[in-house]
Image: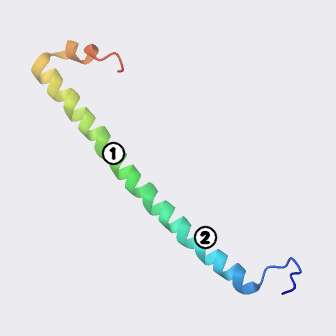
């Protein structure tokens, strides 16, 4: 087998297909991540509201990470 360093057209097509599949998977994962981040933020707001309702506004200052 002699290699001239050139990539065959079939290999280019295959690599382009693989890239398209990978990009689609990445976009789908980013979409799922956004949904999860939004849900987490919503839950954090709900927990904060429940703490305020139960303990008052001072309870939010008890966690030094906030």
Q: Is residue 17 left or right of residue 57?
A: right
Residue 24, horizontal then vertical, whole percent: 50, 67
Residue ID at (13%, 17%): 55
Disc number lying in front (1 or 2): 2
Q: Quadrant of the C terminus?
A: top left
For label 2, the crowd category at 10 Å Cα-Cα, with few meaning under 14, some 14 to 19 and many 20 or more, is few
**Residue 10 in the figure: left or right of residue 50:** right
Establish if 35 lies above or below 16. above
Q: Earlier in the sequence, mark 1 or mark 2?
A: 2
In the displayed structure, would residue 18 be above or below residue 47? below
| Mark 1 → mark 2, Cα distance in angstroms | 28 Å
Q: Residue at x 12, y 23 (%)?
A: 53
> Which image quarter: residue 61?
top left
| Image location (x, y in percent) of residue 38 | 33, 45
Q: Is residue 40 above or below residue 7?
A: above
Residue that label 1 marks: 38
The structure residue drawn at horizontal position 26% and vertical position 14%, both measured from the top left corner, is: 62
- Tell me if mark 1 has few (under 14), some (14-19) or many (20+) residues whose alpha carbon lies within 10 angstroms of its own: few
Q: Say which element carries label 2.
A: helix
State the residue position of label 2. 19
Of 43 and 9, the residue lying toward us: 9
Quadrant (top left, top right, bottom left, bottom right) of the N terminus: bottom right
In this rendering, is residue 60 above or below 9? above
Point out residue 15 in the picture as x, y percentages from the top left corner. Answer: 66, 75
Q: How many marks?
A: 2
């Amino acid at each position: 087998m002699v290699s001239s360093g050139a990539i065959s057209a079939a290999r280019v097509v295959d690599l382009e297909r693989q890239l398209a599949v990978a990009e689609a998977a990445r976009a789908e994962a980013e979409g799922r991540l956004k949904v999860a981040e939004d849900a987490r933020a919503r839950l954090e707001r709900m927990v904060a509201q429940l703490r305020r309702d139960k303990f008052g506004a001072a309870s939010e200052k008890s966690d030094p990470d906030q």
